[in-house]
Image: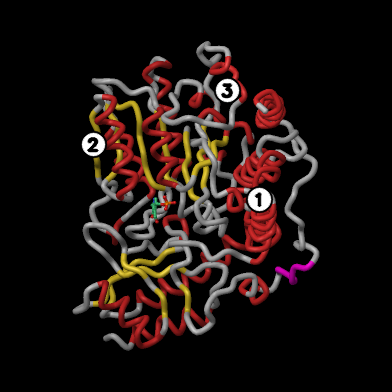
Amino acid sequence: MLSRRRFLLTSALAAGAGAVPTGFAAEKKWPDAVDDLRDWGAVRRQFDLDPRYIHLSLFFMASHPRPVREAIESYRQQLEANPLETIERLVFGGPEDYIPTKVCNAIASYIGGSADDIALTQNTTTGLAVIYQGLPLKPGDEILTTTHDHFVHHEAIRLAAERSGATWRKVPLFDAYGAISTEELVERLRKAIRPETRVVGVTWVHSSSGLKLPIRRMADALEVVNRGRAPERRVFFAVDGVHGLGVEEPDIVAMGMDAFSAGTHKWIFGPRGTGFVWARPEVWSVMRPIMPSTSSAELFFAWASERPPEPPARATWFSPGGFQAFEHYWAVPEAFELHQAIGPRRITERIHELNAQMREGLAKMPHVILYTPRSKELSAGMVCFDVNGMTSQQVVWRLVERHRILATTTPYAVPYARVAFGIQNTPEEVETTLAAIRAMA
Ligand SMILES: Cc1ncc(COP(=O)(O)O)c(C=O)c1O
């Protein structure tokens, strides 16, 4: 058994080192049976959403679209029928069956870059921990972040700082929502960097306000800082990208960061409990894994022959290992394929159009304070606001109780009301939501 497993593992892990699989187990009913995805109504019908509601919080947790549901169901049935052989074939089998490669290929074909530079995680949070705990930090180093990031991002930084002896600092990138400019965002970040700063961590689209940061411009500014530094003192640029992925144009690697973490269970509508980290190979090579991976042949054989793993460290060393919710993981490619089939550019345009319609409508209401910038350059798929005389929670309750509109409050120290229009929504739903908020005057 051991030698068979060992043999199986060898071929599977070799596949993880870059081979392209040729066959997969999910019986594909899609795309043959798919509707004409040029029609947004057909896109909406991919989801089993309760039609009695207007769903404006799908960025929070994905509803699985039909291709994803069907792939999950197909894998689930195989696992129920024969867990051992299904896993041996798809996880420990030959390169042609090895699904993690297919998953990384699907992600890479969407974000750009190489599938070899992708570690698979369970969500954005795990990915942020992989990045910050993995970076080579020591006492005297500093992690610089902003006051606008999510709780889990700051926690990942706090825990990594505590363990490494590094310090961390938060800076605001703007003073008032009404007066945010790209130049100011970049300049504030650049000026906050100190000689001891070794990592800069930001969030592509703030779930606190809907503000989208100019990541490419920030990466350029960091590049200039790094030109004046010795390689071992360079500043790493880490991005929580979860609310840009699947909204903005997909050439993510081209934005120039060093490491990027996102869940695939929000705007990409991938299976719940899936995500990834992409990092440059030279960044993976200086990082340290924080937990055992079962995706790397080198790690396994180093253990089996009682020797240290042969550097350099690479992405497969960082995928948190052990058995997973496999039927979810294996269905990740279907989510990316659906995005590609609809057309990433069309998706970006549609999401921007709907959310701009919402922002413009709110901006005309004297009883509403709009926090999300109105320009396309500084916004993405979310709109955050307050209604005078009501708490954000009261606004959200009123929307659901009187109008069956599903909005959220932002989970930050100062919460706002938040709506997010995605590819399932319509211009009519924007108007209905605006009318509901108008009625709160
Ligand atoms: C900006 C941001 N980062 C991270 C997360 C956590 O995401 P996940 O559940 O994929 O870990 C959230 C949650 O919505 C978020 O808004």
In the picture of the structure, the residue carrying the numbered disc 1 is 333
Q: Are marks 1 and 3 in contact (CB under 8 Å)?
A: no
Majority SS type along the magenta span: loop
SS state under label 1? helix
Q: Quadrant of the C terminus?
A: bottom left
Q: Position of residue 265 (x, y in %)?
A: 51, 56
Tell me residue 126's x, y (percent): 42, 42
The amino acid pointed to by label 3 is Phe
Q: Amino acid at mark 2?
A: Arg
Query: Any mark on residue 296, and which?
Result: none
- Which of label 1 and label 3 is nearer to you? 3
Residue 381 drawn at (x, y percent): 47, 62
- Residue 405 versus residue 268 in the image, above or below: below
Look at mark 2 in the image and give the residue it sits on. Answer: 169
The residue depicted at 31 percent of the width and 82 percent of the height is 398
For the magenta stretch, what is the residue range? 33-37
Camera sees residue 343: no
Relative image position of residue 340 (x, y in whole percent):
68, 55
- Residue located farthest toward the front when viewing the structure as drawn: 1
Please tell me how crowded label 3 is: few (under 14), some (14-19), or many (20+) other residues with Cα within 10 Å.
Answer: some
Q: Classify residue 402 as left or right of residue 101.
A: left
| Closer to the camera in the image, 346 or 287 | 287
Q: Does the stretch in magenta take in 34? A: yes
Q: Amino acid at mark 1?
A: Pro
Residue 300: image tag: 3
Depth check, mark 2 against mark 1: the one in front is 1
Q: Is residue 272 visible?
A: yes
Q: Quadrant of residue 361?
A: bottom left
Q: Quadrant of residue 90?
A: top right
Q: Is residue 153 left or right of residue 309?
A: left
